[in-house]
Amino acid sequence: MDTEHGWTSTPVTADLLRGALDLERTERGVLPHRLPAYARAQIPDGQLAMAESQPSGVRLVFRTAATAVEVDVVATKRVYAGAAPRPDGVYELLVDGRLAGRAGVPDGDVFTIDMAAGTVETRPGPVRTLRFTGLPGDDKDVEIWLPHDETTQLVALRTDAPVRTAPPRGRRVWLHHGSSISHGSNADTPTGTWPAVAAALGEVELVNLGFGGGALLDPFTARAMRDTPADLISVKIGINVVNADLMRLRAFGPAVHGFLDTVREGHPTAPLLVASAIHCPIHEDTPGPSAPDVGAMSEGRLRFLATGDPAETAAGKLTLAVVRDELARIVRQRAPSDPNLHYLDGLDLYGAADYAERPLPDELHPDAATHRHMGERFARLVFGAGGPFTAEHR
């Protein structure tokens, strides 16, 4: 550590990060990743490459008596051509588990996406400094949650007192994989995504492998889960295999089996929960692919449509109703030889009645309040009494 002008500079290393599976050194700092390098080398598209680099659930964690903390970052701002500007990513600082501050940076690298044309442009931007002051001066655990949907390079960490690695809290590690909803799309803060809400209520350490557009039963993701230490594991499957129109029923079932088999290679007895998709009217009985509503985009709104033909389900095309039935069947089939395998119907997290009360603003993703609502429900159903992740399932 170097001390200059009253500040202590601490290198950002893997032992100060939780929720990341890898840390890449860049020209300007370090970039947390939610997939290891061997998995990233097999990513077939830019969407997943972007999503896994967005640090949903990733946080700096350390113990210190500092009253002021500075973090230099390079944020990546996403701009969707024709749509309204996105809000800046939020950084949240927690002291001993309680929110003590929020901050953001107004600019950084700019990533412009034209969904209609299928093009992407990148423009580099500056390093900016986050400042948190007025913290209590006693020894404490500090967490800085990075923006769940904004790729962030960490350049420097400075404090006005020394930093050391936080001791383990003895909490179980929950490893979760899912789609953009698990990633946190439309949540307003990193601790406000439904998995983060559920993890806080369940008193577990979250490793969130929710990837926008990327819950596609990829073998490299299954291997990453196999190789990641965890006490509790969940896999939320459905919306992406439907809205990407990726496979038909004949391929879907074996792909689910293969994914679960791989996870079980590394975690043979851990509680493993298979969850299906929440209610999404455009894809309940209509296959994908989904596509942006060009008319809505011309009005500055992001909205999605289902473009498949319901008649094609007879030929094996997937809808959410078909996927839920198949997942329930697969879990029933495997359960006799895997007593720690469980199923959660996504409609119990958010069903038709919830849609009537809290509609999906863009027809795919819940809003911030619904994220919190889903997290509370998940905690009650899964971490609560009789749930598959209760303490007696250790």
Image: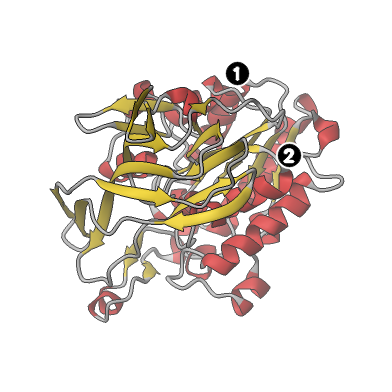
- The residue tagged 2 is 342
- Upstream in the sequence, badge 1 or badge 2? 1
Q: Locate the C terminus by quadrant.
A: top right
Can residue 177 be seen here? no
**What residue sits 62% from the left and 35% below the top?**
139
Residue 18 % position (x, y): 52, 32
**What residue sits 31% from the left and 48% below the top?**
129
User: Which is closer to the viewer, label 1 or label 2?
Assistant: 1
Q: How is the image coloured?
A: secondary structure
Residue 312 % position (x, y): 44, 59
Q: Is residue 210 above or below residue 260?
A: below
What label does residue 266 carry, if any?
1
Q: Locate the N terminus by quadrant.
A: top left
What crowding class fits label 1: few (fewer than 14 Cα within 10 Å), some (14-19), or many (20 or more)?
some
**For the view shown, which residue lies furthest in the bottom direction?**
299
As rendered, which of 379 and 363 lies closer to the eye? 379
What crowding class fits label 2: few (fewer than 14 Cα within 10 Å), some (14-19), or many (20 or more)?
many
Residue 393 % position (x, y): 81, 32
